[in-house]
Image: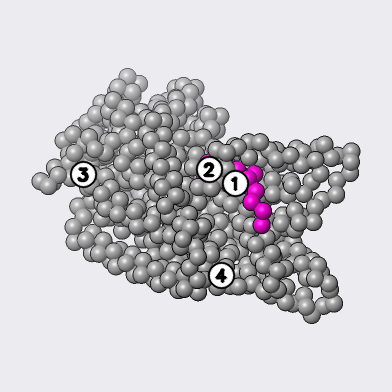
Amino acid sequence: MTFRRDLQGLRAVAVLLVIIAHSELGILEGGFVGVDVFFVLSGYLITGMLISELILSQRISLARFYSHRLKRLLPALVVMVVVISVASLFVLSNYEMGKQLASAPYVLSWVSNIYFFLVEIEYFDELSSKDLFLHTWSLGVEEQFYLVWPLMLFVLYKVSNLFVFRFTGRLYIIFISLILIFFISLCLSAFWTSVNPRFAFYSMFSRAWQFSLGGIGYFVVRKGIYVPSSFRKLSALVPLTGLVLVVGSALVLHPRLQYPGFWALLPSFGAFLVIVSPSLPSYRSFSLLDHPVFVWLGNVSYSLYLWHWPIFILGFSLGLGGGIVSTAGLIVLIFLLAGISYRYIELPFWKGRFSEVDSKVSLLISLVIMAGMIAVANFGLRQLTMAHSMNDVSSSWRNDVPTLYKLSCDTWVSDSAVEPCIFGASTAEKTVVLLGDSIGIQWFSVVQAIFKEPEWRVVVITKSSCPMIDEDYFYQFIGKVFTVCSEWRASVLDELDRLKPDIVVMGSAGAYGFNEKQWVEGSSRIFKRVGSAAGFVLVIPPTPTLGFDGPGCVLRHLSRSGKINSNRCLAKGRLKHVDAIGGFLSSSARHFSNIFVLNLNDLVCPEKICRAATADGAVVFRDSQHLTNSFVKSKVSIVSRRIDEMLGNGSPDIITGP
């Protein structure tokens, strides 16, 4: 096939969108659509390559095809996995490595997409622990496409011999089959996205329509498109329209949508328009895509894609995320590694001296290397697991949770029933209700210590990932709008009307994707109901997240004497988002005389610096977002004084502090 500079430029756009989306700069959240562009491009290129071989030789050499694909992709992948695994020894703790590198054997056998689906790793869940090789899910999808596509095209070509067609008729059968695959796979993708979004995202079957669309693009380019003369000048806008669709998708789409489904049509069709544009009269290549810089970026796009994710994850683990300067440094490192990988690893095997190795020999060597690397990866993981089980002090930090976690107070995602956990005598004179998701409930020990028995009873009402904001939201874990949360929240408000508590303490996380309007209006509706049922309401704004695993970082930087270094695991700039939410909550609360915002984030992140551990060695976070119970308990006296100051004037006997 003819080399097309514009398609290399399109590759550059796609990989840049992906890198920006994963940089945690908060821009182009929808940059993940770059992967959709890659799928369409692969469909076009691979279909064209295979059809050309069929036309020339009436057959497809599977050994040559698979060998070529492995030589093109495997060496750089193996080097990336090895380098990142070695680097992890110096960056991650045994616990983190065992968790982060568990996918390595599946990456090297091209089935990581299946692995991530089975272990329920959510691609869009930014609060979950990210696997260092999560990005290779798309390589798994592509390799499975490479495995199936030549066989399918060859069978379709041979089946066409059963009919009385000229040779062009055989291609016609393939073309019609691609159209059928496009519609069937697209409909299945939309269906699976609604009922099993994780499967829809990771499955080759729900992505086949994108490869088919690329294949259809090959036939369109091959045959050309008739355009009436009156519209021929407009046809010059087709590649620009395609580029606008791709970039526009990155601007409009976001991780809180059900994806891929029909949404994936936007970037995919944009890529299709760029692909078919040369078949139009008055075609002019879009100069941006033809620019030498973009062509070079397209050439190294595979290496850029390979290196960007693990470098970001390791960098964020070191606390380098969130800032423009530190993120720019990581991006420079990504480009440096990608350039080296392309020049010294990709090219020699793809177009250099190693590319001439016999197909069958290189295929055998590739399989042996894959098997050996998988064995090494499995052995290394077993050693890490043993080391972690023998010596991991971080487990005590990770399990430092409030006592209520042992009582199953939290109902699961499919259950809207309200199941309060009650601490204290039912005959207590006063009642305080602690209400919210896991971020709000992490303050349980403070509430229990301040509102003491026998005068008080503490009622805990909680549901994980369910904010006390009267707004629906898309919950990535279940792949749809969390309607159960809305039902549970409505039942909670009815329960508060029944309890008539003296005080309600409530809090929620800040990672639900609500905008200012939703925070203000959604909280106002909740405040109105809760405020009418309770004497006083204390609203705790979200606590900031670290952006990395706290215990893992602390463990990495323990001195030989076991002393914790608080200066090695810190994050700056993490308060901006939660402070803004605190402002939204205050804006709503000021309309109610009995509702107060109790901001405790200065206790969590003194001087606006969030640390995984304090200077005196107390571990603050038990993961990347939740506080350890020990840290929370250490703040009882301070929180008690603040509540006294807020509520004391209005009702001096409302609490009994320590």
User: Of callouts 3 and 4, which one flags the residue occurring earlier in the amino acid sequence?
Assistant: 4
The crowding category of the residue bearing disc 4, from other C-alpha atoms within 10 Å (few below 14, some 14 to 19, many at least 20), is some
Of the 4 image quadrants, the one containing the N terminus is: bottom right
Asked where in the image residue 290 lies, by quadrant, the reply is: top right
Q: Nearer the viewer, mark 3 or mark 4?
A: 4
User: Of callouts 1 and 3, which one flags the residue occurring earlier in the amino acid sequence?
Assistant: 1
Residue furthest top in the image: 649
Residue at horizontal 55 percent and vertical 73 percent from the top: 63
Badge 1 element: helix
Marks 3/4 in contact by CB < 8 Å: the verdict is no
Which residue is disc 2 drawn over?
A: 297
Residue type at mark 3 is His
- In space, the residues marked 1 and 2 are separated at their CA atoms by 8 Å
Residue at horizontal 22 percent and vertical 47 percent from the top: 555
Camera-nearest residue between 233 and 129: 233
Left or right: 129 in relation to 181: left
- In space, the residues marked 1 and 3 are separated at their CA atoms by 43 Å
Residue at horizontal 63 percent and vertical 45 percent from the top: 5
Residue 585 highlighted magenta (yes or no): no
Residue type at mark 2 is Leu
Disc number at residue 557?
A: 3
Residue type at mark 4 is Arg
Q: Position of residue 138 (x, y in %)?
A: 52, 56
Marks 1/2 in contact by CB < 8 Å: the verdict is yes
Left or right: 399 in relation to 24: left
Badge 2 element: helix
